[in-house]
């Protein structure tokens, strides 16, 4: 979809549809919607008085112009109550509108910068939200479907501003929105791919493509190099699969310093059968998405490279399959992680924390100042928070607050979980330094406490996205399938850190 900011009068735009907004309880039409209503001989006012248009959030009403305007259709999109308006609501309304228009066969549309200069939403923020909502809302994954889609695509979206002096601001918001949305859709594509098309090698190939396109530095460690570095935890998980593991490292250098300001670490288990502690067959197909954390950090660093903040960022993705092969890891085995800690294996299905242990060890070895890891880590977190919130765990309250704020800005909700010392007891082993599962209760917390052992005193936040990485239904700009959470949160976090 081509998205452009233009200056002009929306009533004079020729398109398949033009979109204007209405707030719930609005008694008098003004501005663009009033002008359009006048051109339509009061059709919108009449529908409002009849109760057909109420301005409720995500309510989308199509009115045919019947030649009274250059545009074929006028869409009235409800923004809900004006005092409750947020940038995220604009995103959601735009997604719902675009999806409906696409289903109606509309291929070109124009909209005002929805919500601009209302409820603390800047003109740039409005353009960004409109762009994100449009691109995220019409996303679909059809790579392996041979049948043609039932409808075409929206090819052009114009964001129309009446003030020409604000055009550069609209364009800036439009650009940022496109970068963030396309990065999110990239992560969605990777997670939606079946595991035979998204192996560790495929992930490394994708990293190489991103490095070449966006000027990132790439290194991919092979099994022998992992052995030299002592990555026994990652190699233990990998030993049951014929697919060789890949340890993917991407660097974005935005400042003159040689230090790594932020390390983004993502779990990259391209298929998780559970290993010898095999999972039930029901919904095991969803385990192709156990690399959603790895996809998110890879997509995030590609967006960061395009937005060019003055900060140095490293993305680390330990990529492997977890399968019950003839040489697979066994319950009772003991592994030695890169930092020298020994780990007793109680369940081979608690493999994500093992590969993250070595990834955090690597980030610390390279001297990363801050670390954020992202993983579809525990069913326990999904049980606790459902598919609405990701869980945040960490050892540094200031960093946790920044991550949550970055998520709020993105519309990706995050809830802080407790990290009391008492939970560490559950991870104690009688035969090793630590065991890889803490028992039946508090599973998301004991998993985070396990990873904390490898973060040490480096400021660190762990995001458990087991519940939020997939959506079972369409909900505003969250489409069915992979969500791309928390790509935009990570980018927002890095941009805010760069400003400081």
Image (cartoon, grey):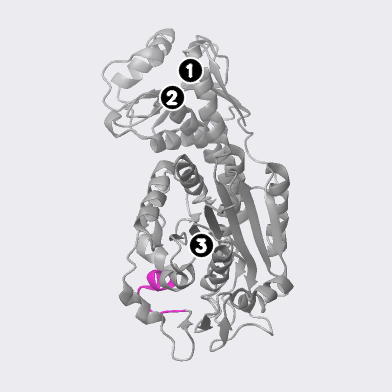
Q: Is label 2 in a helix, a strand or a loop?
A: helix
Is residue 445 one of those drawn in magenta? Answer: yes
Q: Is residue 144 above or below residue 124?
A: below
Q: Quadrant of residue 426?
A: bottom left
The picture places residue 488, in percent across and down from the top left corner, at 50, 45
Q: Is residue 261 above or below residue 122?
A: below
Are discs 2 and 1 less than 8 Å apart at CB? yes
Disc 2 target residue:
123
Which range is magenta?
Answer: 437-447
Residue at the image position 61 percent from the left and 73 percent from the top: 234
Q: Which residue bears the numbered disc 3?
A: 375
Kindly report the distance in space between the C-alpha atoms of the residues bearing marks 3 and 1. Answer: 40 Å
State which tag comes first along the sequence, 3 or 2: 2
Q: Which residue is mark 1?
A: 166
- Residue 196 visible somewhere in the drawing: no
Mark before the other along the chain sequence, 3 or 1: 1
Across and down, in percent, residue 345 comes to: 52, 83
């Amino acid at each position: 979809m081509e998205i452009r900011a233009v200056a002009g009068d929306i009533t004079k735009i020729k398109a398949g549809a033009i979109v204007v907004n209405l707030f719930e309880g609005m008694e008098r039409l003004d501005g663009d919607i009033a002008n359009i209503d006048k051109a339509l001989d009061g059709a919108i006012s009449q529908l409002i008085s009849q109760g057909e248009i109420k301005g409720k959030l995500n309510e989308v009403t199509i009115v045919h112009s019947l030649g009274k305007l250059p545009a074929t259709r006028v869409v009235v999109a409800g923004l809900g109550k004006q005092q409750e308006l947020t940038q995220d609501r604009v995103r959601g309304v735009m997604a719902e509108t675009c999806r409906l228009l696409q289903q109606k066969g509309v291929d070109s549309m124009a909209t005002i910068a929805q919500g601009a200069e209302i409820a603390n939403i800047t003109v740039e923020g409005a353009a960004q939200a409109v762009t994100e909502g449009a691109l995220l809302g019409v996303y679909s994954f059809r790579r392996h479907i041979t049948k043609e889609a039932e409808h075409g695509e929206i090819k052009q979206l114009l964001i129309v501003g009446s003030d020409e002096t604000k055009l550069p601001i609209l364009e800036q918001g439009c650009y940022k929105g496109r970068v963030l949305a396309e990065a999110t859709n990239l992560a969605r594509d990777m997670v939606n791919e079946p595991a035979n098309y998204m192996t560790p090698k495929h992930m490394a190939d994708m990293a190489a493509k991103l490095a070449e396109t966006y000027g990132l530095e790439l290194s991919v460690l092979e099994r022998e190099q992992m052995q030299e570095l002592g990555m026994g935890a990652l190699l233990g998980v990998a030993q049951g699969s014929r697919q060789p593991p890949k340890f993917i490292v991407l660097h974005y250098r935005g400042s003159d310093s040689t230090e790594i300001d932020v390390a983004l670490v993502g779990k990259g288990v391209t298929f998780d059968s559970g290993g010898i502690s095999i999972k039930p067959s029901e919904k095991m197909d969803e385990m192709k998405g156990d690399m959603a954390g790895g996809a998110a950090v890879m997509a995030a660093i590609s967006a960061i490279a395009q937005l060019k903040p003055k900060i140095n960022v490293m993305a680390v993705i330990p990529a492997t399959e977890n399968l019950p092969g003839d040489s697979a890891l066994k319950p009772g085995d003991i592994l030695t992680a890169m930092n020298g800690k020994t780990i007793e294996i109680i369940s081979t299905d608690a493999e994500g924390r093992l590969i993250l242990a070595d990834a955090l060890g690597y980030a610390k070895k390279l001297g990363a100042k801050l670390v954020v890891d992202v993983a579809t880590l525990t069913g326990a977190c999904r049980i606790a928070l459902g598919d609405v919130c990701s869980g945040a765990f960490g050892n540094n309250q200031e960093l946790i607050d920044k991550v949550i704020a970055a998520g709020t800005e993105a519309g990706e909700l995050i809830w802080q979980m407790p990290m009391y010392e008492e939970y560490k007891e559950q991870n104690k082993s009688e035969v090793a330094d630590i065991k890889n599962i803490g028992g039946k209760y508090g599973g998301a917390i004991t998993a985070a406490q396990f990873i904390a052992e490898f973060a040490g005193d480096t400021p660190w936040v762990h995001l458990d996205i087991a519940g939020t990485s997939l959506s079972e239904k369409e909900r505003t700009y969250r489409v069915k399938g992979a969500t791309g959470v928390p790509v935009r949160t990570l980018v927002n976090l890095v941009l805010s850190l760069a400003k400081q």
